[in-house]
Image: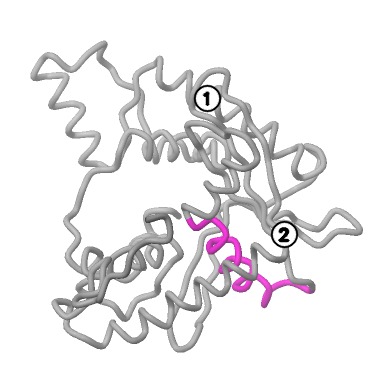
Amino acid sequence: MSQAYHAKKATPQDTSKPVSKSLLWQFGKSPWKWAHQVASQPTAAMNLGSVVHAITLEPDKVSEVFTLSEFDSFRTKEARDWRDQKVAEGLIVLSEKDYLAAATMAHRATGELHRALGGDHVGYQVEQEVTGSINGVDVCGLIDVVPDGPVPPAPAVLWDLKTCGSIGDERSLQRTVFDFGYHVQAALYCDLMAAEMDDEPSFGFIFVETTVPYETTHIILDRDCILAGRAKYMELINRWSHLRKKPLDEWPGSVERGIVMEPPSWA
């Protein structure tokens, strides 16, 4: 699902395709950089997140995401050729040590998910794609966990799994949510999903640390967070709608050209 989903999204060569939260967030930082992006390989942290997601949410499909290395190292040409072939096939290559760490993280994340859902008896769907149109722009999303039904008397809560280096305290986690635009993701997914549900859903996040002992927690965003996220995604969608009609070289960067700079508040 993930590869097919990402293939549907807009590119600099075709801005008529749907946009996602991650695309809008990158675009919002610098439209010019998004328009002139250069293909790059996923980072080690991104690969680890993909592996933990697969083991936690779709264990029957892990062979489509990663493979265990047949070699202790990649010093020999044979080992490097094998690794490069697997990467070319779209697979993440893991050592046994890295796999055991990812499996432990996934075990912790699964336990936290069950706590968030109210028990391991609650059924749910994973990797559910949602689509819609907002102000003439096609949008899409991929929700990690959609419960089969709400836990009375609360409305349904949609969930997303996040790996992180450190959960920190409540204040630092709040900053993580807003710095990475998780509130924007939550608002967009809730709004796309609301059309398919009787009641407007809420949104929560499962966090699992990527360092021993792999602490976990879960949070639910309140109404004000969703409203702030909605305002931000509307701003980004409207900007996208305006700029996609222009040549890519005319898209602005992260700092508007020709602005008159004022002193900062702390100066």
Please give the name of the residue rendered at 25% of the width and 41% of the height, measured from the top-left corner. Answer: 89
In the picture of the structure, the residue carrying the numbered disc 1 is 103
Compared to residue 22, the image places residue 61 above or below, namely: above
Specify whether 221 is left or right of 120: left
Q: Position of residue 199 (x, y in %)?
A: 79, 72
Seen from this angle, which residue lies furthest top?
A: 72
Q: Quadrant of the N terminus?
A: bottom left
Q: Position of residue 13 (x, y in %)?
A: 20, 73
Q: Nearer the viewer, residue 32 or 154?
A: 32
Disc assigned to residue 115: none
Q: Quadrant of the C terminus?
A: bottom left
Seen from this angle, which residue lies furthest right?
A: 153
Q: Which residues are magenta?
A: 181-198
Q: Position of residue 86 (x, y in %)?
A: 24, 34
Q: Nearer the viewer, residue 161 or 251?
A: 251
Q: Say whether residue 93 is magenta.
A: no
Question: Disc 2 and disc 1: Cα gap in Å?
Answer: 31 Å
Q: Amino acid at mark 1?
A: Ala
Specify whether 259 is left or right of 45: left
> Residue 9 occupies which quadrant of the picture?
bottom left
Residue 5 seen: no
Compared to residue 41, the image places residue 192 above or below, namely: below
In the picture of the structure, the residue carrying the numbered disc 2 is 222
Please give the name of the residue rendered at 54% of the width and 41% of the height, measured from the top-left corner. Answer: 58
Q: Report the magenta stretch's main SS.
A: helix
Q: How is the image coloured?
A: one colour
SS class of the residue under badge 1?
helix
Q: Nearer the viewer, residue 173 or 37?
A: 173
